Image (cartoon, coloured by chain):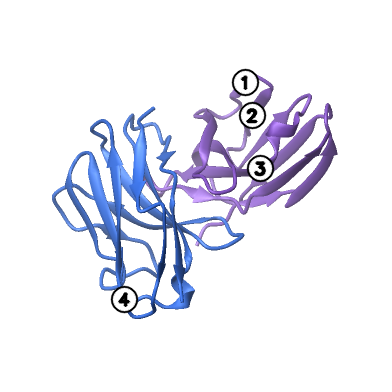
Chain colours: A purple, B blue
Amino acid sequence: GQQLNQSPQSMFIQEGEDVSMNCTSSSIFNTWLWYKQDPGEGPVLLIALYKAGELTSNGRLTAQFGITRKDSFLNISASIPSDVGIYFCAGQLETSGSRLTFGEGTQLTVNP
Amino acid sequence: SAVISQKPSRDICQRGTSLTIQCQVDSQVTMMFWYRQQPGQSLTLIATANQGSEATYESGFVIDKFPISRPNLTFSTLTVSNMSPEDSSIYLCSVSDRGLGEQYFGPGTRLTVT
């Protein structure tokens, strides 16, 4: 099946640092979504992107839809301890209708 | 966004038995989906639950193993049949309504099969 390559797999940072993670694919996507999952809970939607080149912010989070429509990144600025969790990218392929393909996730640890 | 609940939140089941998981949304939604998340892994789509017709299953998932119902626009069930320890996972439902691709997830059902 289609794959999303998400990197890095894990990150260990100090509180206050900025974080960047990305997803790439060989396929073209119509939509990119970024989720955060805390232990024992379902993923929570952080940012949704719909157009190539689109740059969207949600508080300290910023995400971009790549120009080629094959990649996306998520930045978190001035990290805080509650940013800890697993971040997933998800994309809606131009050929897959409403179905989402998920990346493998980035485990973020923030040291106070 | 819609408020989504799942029942049960967790269960421990014997192999060979079946478990039905319920997903309830507080508003009518167009699309409902079922995912599996194995320990330490990402999410894998099991099927799209279609209102009034048979679910659409992804490759590797079959109706006999994961029968799905969707009797109306706010409710769906997923049954995990003839369970084995390999079925131990978190099962998540999600909904989409605006036609833009956004999906919102329930809290998940953590299933352990012994």
Disc number placed over residue A63 in the picture, else none = 2
Given the image, what chain letter belongs to the residue carrying mark 4?
A: B
- Measure the alpha-carbon separation of dots 3 and 2: 17 Å
Q: Quadrant of residue B56?
A: bottom left
- Measure the alpha-carbon separation of dots 1 and 2: 6 Å
Q: Are marks 2 and 4 in contact (CB under 8 Å)?
A: no
Q: Amino acid under label 2?
A: Ala
From the image, state whether disc 3 or disc 4 is nearer to you. 4
Q: Which residue is mark 4?
A: B17
The image shows a total of numbered marks equal to 4
Q: Amino acid under label 1?
A: Ser
Q: Which residue is mark 1?
A: A57
Q: Determine crowd level at label 1: few under 14, some 14-19, many 20+ residues with C-alpha closer than 10 A.
A: some
- Measure the alpha-carbon separation of dots 3 and 1: 19 Å
Query: Residue B19 in the image: x percent, y percent?
Result: 31, 66
Q: Judging from the image, what secondary structure is the residue with disc 4 in?
A: loop
Q: Judging from the image, what secondary structure is the residue with disc 2 in?
A: strand
Q: Amino acid under label 4?
A: Thr
Given the image, what chain letter belongs to the residue carrying mark 1?
A: A
Given the image, what chain letter belongs to the residue carrying mark 2?
A: A
Left or right of A18, for residue B42: left
Q: Are marks 3 and 2 in contact (CB under 8 Å)?
A: no
Q: Which residue is mark 3?
A: A85
Q: Report the front residue among A21 and B41.
A: B41
Q: Are marks 3 and 4 in contact (CB under 8 Å)?
A: no
Q: Amino acid under label 3?
A: Gly
Q: Report the front residue among B71 and A50.
A: B71
- Measure the alpha-carbon separation of dots 3 and 4: 33 Å
State whether discs 2 and 4 lie on one chain. Answer: no
Given the image, what chain letter belongs to the residue carrying mark 3?
A: A
